[in-house]
């Protein structure tokens, strides 16, 4: 049986969508569809029902799902074992983290690391969703949520301080200061409903009763942009907001939240020289995510 067919089958089974599966596999929906048809032809059975809600496994599809997942575990284990034998301090390393961590801390500190490791190629995958290190969606992850599954090595490398910010002009116009802050005098900017638990979202919901929500967003870039544009107050990571002279902190992290910062790698890859070099670089950045480190 063709592993490529099984790989595409698993992605459609997990996402319930050809389009989402294609995005995850970096392929076209047509290519994913052809692999599903190929597997169905080999097995002589339909694996999915195509409904308005998406692709749903048939009884046959459900019956082979566990076996396909077992095959995936075995193949990925072989790939990691082969990868771990590479002792060169060169090659590609894929890092998964959030957009703001990447753009405001990791990338600004990259030049000396890149200069001293000319053989390394670093891919950065920035997303608010958690990628799978087991499936090799990334080699290393920098996260503010501690994973609780998988054969992973997890190390705390710091803390991410979160504060409530507004543009300086917005705060001055409403008479808002850290010593005299009142949600009744401010509009709020927060996450869309399905992301409401992210980064201080619960604290904001509990404490901003009576404040009008000016905007809901689904990315840190939009949250930051809306706040600097003067739409209202927003919870932002201090490592970026404290460096922006157009913003003022109205509620400190001590009252809101400091999230642990975790460096995560699959146990099979932790000793690979190029992976270890990237991990050491990221560990050294840990203090820069705290508020005291980010203040000018």
Image: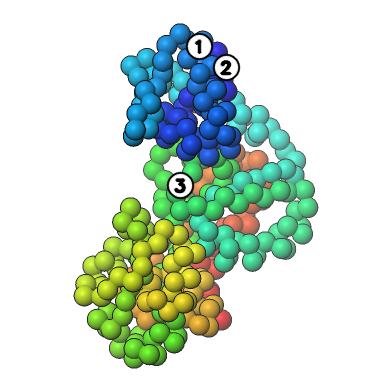
Say whether disc 1 or disc 2 marks the residue closer to the N-terminus.
2
Residue at horizontal 39 percent and vertical 90 percent from the top: 172
Q: Quadrant of the N terminus?
A: top right
Quadrant into which the C terminus falls: bottom right
How far separated are the C-alphas under marks 3 and 1? Answer: 34 Å
Please tell me how crowded label 1 is: few (under 14), some (14-19), or many (20+) other residues with Cα within 10 Å.
few
Could you say where residue 216 lies in the image, as x and y percent from the top left? 36, 64
The picture places residue 166, in percent across and down from the top left corner, at 41, 79
Q: Which element carries disc 3, helix, strand or loop?
A: loop
Of 54 and 63, nearer the camera is 54
Residue displayed at 29% across by 63% down: 202
SS at badge 1: helix
Q: Residue at x 30, y 88 (%)?
A: 180
**Vertically, is 172 above or below 289?**
below
Report the Cα–Cα distance between label 3 and label 2: 28 Å
Task: Point out which mark residue 2 bears.
Answer: 2
Say how many tags the image has.
Answer: 3
Residue 168 placement: quadrant: bottom left
Q: Name the residue carrying label 1.
A: 41
Label 2 sits on a secondary structure element that is loop
Residue picked out by circle 3 = 130
Whether 101 is drawn above or below 74: the answer is: below
């Amino acid at each position: 049986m063709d592993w490529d067919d099984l790989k595409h089958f698993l992605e459609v089974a997990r996402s319930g969508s050809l389009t989402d599966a294609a995005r995850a596999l970096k392929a076209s929906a047509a290519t994913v569809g052809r692999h599903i048809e190929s597997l169905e032809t080999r097995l002589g059975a339909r694996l999915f029902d195509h409904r308005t809600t998406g692709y749903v496994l048939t009884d046959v599809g459900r019956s082979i799902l566990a076996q396909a997942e077992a095959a995936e575990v075995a193949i990925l284990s072989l790939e990691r074992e082969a990868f771990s034998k590479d002792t060169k301090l060169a090659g590609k390393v894929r890092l998964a983290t959030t957009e703001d961590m990447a753009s405001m801390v990791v990338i600004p500190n990259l030049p000396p690391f890149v200069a001293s490791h000319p053989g390394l190629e670093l891919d950065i995958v920035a997303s608010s969703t958690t990628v799978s290190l087991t499936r090799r969606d990334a080699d290393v992850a920098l996260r503010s949520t501690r994973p609780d599954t998988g054969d992973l090595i997890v190390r705390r490398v710091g803390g991410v301080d979160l504060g409530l910010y507004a543009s300086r002009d917005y705060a001055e116009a409403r008479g808002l200061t850290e010593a005299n802050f009142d949600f009744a005098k401010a509009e709020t900017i927060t996450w869309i409903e399905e992301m409401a638990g992210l980064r201080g979202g619960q604290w904001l919901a509990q404490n901003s009763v009576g404040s009008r929500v000016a905007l809901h967003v689904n990315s840190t870039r939009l949250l930051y942009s809306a706040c600097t544009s003067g739409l209202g107050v927003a919870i932002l990571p201090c490592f970026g907001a404290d460096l922006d002279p157009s913003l003022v902190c109205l509620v400190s992290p001590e009252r809101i939240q400091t999230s642990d910062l975790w460096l995560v790698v699959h146990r099979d890859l932790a000793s690979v020289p190029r992976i270890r070099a990237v991990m050491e670089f990221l560990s050294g950045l840990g203090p820069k995510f705290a508020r005291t480190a980010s203040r000018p």
